[in-house]
Amino acid sequence: MSTPKTIASPRPDTDVLVVGAGPVGLALAGDLGWRGHRCMLIDSGDGVIGQPRMDLVGIRTMEFCRRWGLVGDVEAAPYNRDYPQDNVYLTSLNGYELGRQPMPSMRENPYPPESPQRRERCPQNMFDPVLQKFAKAQAGVDLRYQHRFLSFEQDDEGVTSRLLNLASGEELTVRSHFLVGCDGGKSTVREQLGIPMHGKGLLTHTTNVIFRCATFNALHDKQPGYRYMFVGPAGTWATIVAINGRDQWRMSIIGSAQERPRYTEDELKAFACKALGREFDPEILSVLRWTRAELVADRYHQGRVFIAGDAAHLTSPTGGLGMNTGIGDAVDLSWKLAACLQGWGGQALLDSYGIERKPVAERITRFSTGNLQTMKKVPSAEKVNEPGPEGDAARAAVGHALGEGLKREWFSQNMHLGNRYHGSPVCVFNEKEDLALVAAENEDAVNYLPTTRPGCRAPHAWLADGRSTLDLFGKSFVLLVSGTAQEARALSEAAQDRGLPMDVVELTDPAIRALYAKKFVLVRPDGHVAWRADHLPDDMGNLLDTVTGSLVNFDVADDLPALYARLDRVRMKNGWAKPTPSLYPEPRQNFVPAHWRYADARAALHAAGRLVGTEWAERRNLIMANPIPGNDYATVRTLVGAYQMVKAGETARSHRHSPNAMRVVLEAGQGTYTIVDGVKVPMLPGDVLLTPNMCYHGHSNESDAEAYWVDFLDAPLVQHLGPMFFELHPDTLERADTVDPASPMRFAYADYLPRLLAAAPVAPGVRTLELGPPRLDTFDRTVIRIDADAHWHCPRDTVNRIFTVIEGQGHSVVNGERFEWKRGDMLAAPSWYVHEHHATHDTVLLQVSDAPLLHMLNWHRTGAA
């Protein structure tokens, strides 16, 4: 089993940095601390909840609260536990009641047989303090409010984050093994990861108003309810919920996706009066304008950085699943991070977080949007306010539609307890299943079926000692045996050898044995089933490696998409269905012909001379990057060309690097030099100068005019292969006392031009001369003379070329595209393109190409013109 590098790295400031101290961040930090790990939890706010965004603590979340010892705190929250929880559909509270779904108060709500807990009404301003208390009680949790997350950088060993203390203005740097963004729908962490979200997107612009009115229920003639839903001729337009079951109420003006109103206080009070059906004076405590959306992040992590809660999924609150799903994210992620911190969790365990939780988010967002649509688009509402038989019929139709349509929301047990991690890479699916039935169960919001099928929540049953089976799960794997512990000894010892925490529990009650179905059921720390069977596997190491994320199980891939998903988890790609082939019958070229004007470059460099100081003189250049998407450097695939300028009286720092380099001088006066390995080499117009790799070189302009030249380097090739080194000279400027006009690194224009003119023609009016020795292994330089009115046609081959016009004027055609050029211009002719050059004046071109490299590797080929 592999051990994450985290364990071997130096101790960071904290194990996990969590950004965002809402319910999800608090639950994650508390659970990590409960597992014995250090966690820093930061939030830019002060921890005070001005307007609660949630009020339902779902049954699965209450099971987690049971694990953490928080049930008493939730039940002791200030919400009135005797207040009825009916959902009521009305035209107004003093108008027509269209229907009602009776629901018991929290105190009277029975415990379902499927769980030791029940759902609770505990709004965020009451639930957050419970989770704050839990997090603060853990020795390893460092909770810091008034701290803003700025940015992060991650590497193989951890994550470095920048924070701002809003109280002091101090900027902090925090090093952690992992970073988790629980920072809401506008998550900075998700944005910096570059993770997009997809779904139906914006659903409504909604306005929430918290108002106080202790006598609200006395102002109407209806029986009290928790949620009042108000229907007009256009459908449901608002809701009012009993936010504390006493004197505070939350009115939500549902709105639409098209309009984004900003209501005045008088307008908000008018809405409240409209809902009540009479005048009254509500005391408005807070107003929250928010956007309702259905969006799920494309992925839940990248490297060591994760997202959870609203940072990963945005949903309509019509179902009460947003926060509860986020708590589920936290529990799923926490034990996996802990496993890797403790050394027994593998990479696939971290990868499984998004694989398991993203389908849950997609499920609950679809469900919640469906509830919203049922609520808003009620049929036959046009006459709902009219008296008489037609109005009665309309009201009956609306009441029936809402009553029946929203039962799946009010009784959505399966949305809370029935989330199955089907297809998870860290569960073992060793039984044949009806996939249509699995899909149907996933779509069923109401009917929860307790089962120990892999990926499901392990079912609740009461043990003889008064505990629930759920009380067995939390900090370790648990192997439940319908038999004796001795029968599981081999698997228990294999787990111990790997450092995997595993408890073995004997099931003796026949009813519980029947519920758990198999002789051996392995339950994960989060309470989901990892594996079950009637016999221990022959390869117990393979089983343990799978459930700890150290192995991906390919045997359960029933089709190619399933196989591809598993290949992705081990960072492999198939070779038979690649979207782009690796081998093809002839070269494919994504670089394009391109032309750059020296006049433009010269003007830009002259301006840069005013703005870029001498300390950057060796970098004061303009790169001719080929204009293809994603490229910001290479001119052709293996070479780059760049214009450079050194001002009069200026010296550029000496340096050396892995790439070979050369330059052709366009403008320079007497006293302009390049210094190569301690020797001054004069630079005059038309001269070509070499700088072999790892030779120190610098430039000095002792003339009274700016000097301009073109640099050529094989840096794109070096970058692709990897052996890039660069360093400045230890003396900043290399000392050079000797001037050598005849240096072998210099091909003086005055020397090579006569030889070029005397060369044998290669075509009518065309002569060529390769400059050298010395020669470079990766690119050559050839000067080309084209007489006025002559032209040179070149068939396509595998060589990449850059041309610079030393003298003359004309045009070139590359792959059918025409470019007009004159002195100093640069032209890119990528490989496998036919190109030809036409001179209108006597012309000298410099061609720089990677031909030596291609010939050396036997990659040079020619094609038909």
Image: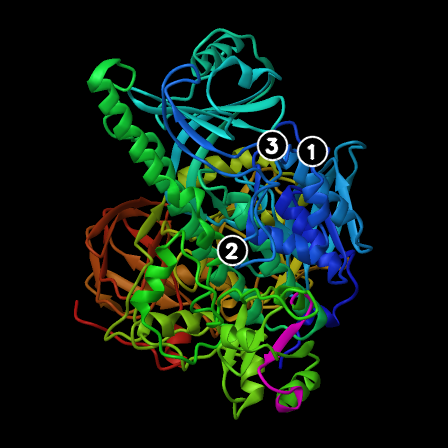
Q: Please report the bounds of the magenta region as a residue range.
A: 473-487
Quote the CA–CA distance across marks 3 and 1.
Answer: 14 Å
User: As shown in the figure, which amino acid type bears the numbered disc 1?
Assistant: Pro
Verify CB contact (< 8 Å) between mark 3 and mark 2: no
Judging by the rendered image, the residue that carries numbered circle 3 is 52
- Indicate which label's residue lies in the foreground, 3 or 2: 3
Residue 836 sits in which quadrant?
Answer: bottom left
User: As shown in the figure, which amino acid type bears the numbered disc 3?
Assistant: Pro
Judging by the rendered image, the residue that carries numbered circle 1 is 78
Q: Position of residue 165 (x, y in %)?
A: 76, 37
**Residue 564 visible (yes or no):** yes
Observer-nearest residue: 225 or 577?
225
Q: Position of residue 628 (x, y in %)?
A: 36, 52
Type of colouring: rainbow
Residue 20 sits in which quadrant?
Answer: top right
- Indicate which label's residue lies in the foreground, 3 or 1: 1
User: As shown in the figure, which amino acid type bears the numbered disc 2?
Assistant: Tyr
Observer-nearest residue: 659 or 680?
659
Q: Can residue 630 be found in the magenta stretch?
A: no
- Indicate which label's residue lies in the foreground, 2 or 1: 1
Q: Quadrant of the C terminus?
A: bottom left
Residue drawn at (57%, 64%), measured in percent from left and top?
460
Residue drawn at (35%, 82%), measured in percent from left and top?
858
Q: Which label sits on residue 300?
A: 2
**Residue 689 visible (yes or no):** no
Q: Residues within 10 Å of mark 3 (few under 14, many from 20)?
A: some
**Which element carries disc 2, helix, strand or loop?**
loop
Q: Position of residue 230 (x, y in %)?
A: 40, 23
Q: Could you tell which of marks 3 and 2 lies nearer the N-terminus?
A: 3
Q: Can residue 482 be found in the magenta stretch?
A: yes
Q: Is residue 484 above or below residue 606?
A: below
Q: Residues within 10 Å of mark 1 (few under 14, many from 20)?
A: some
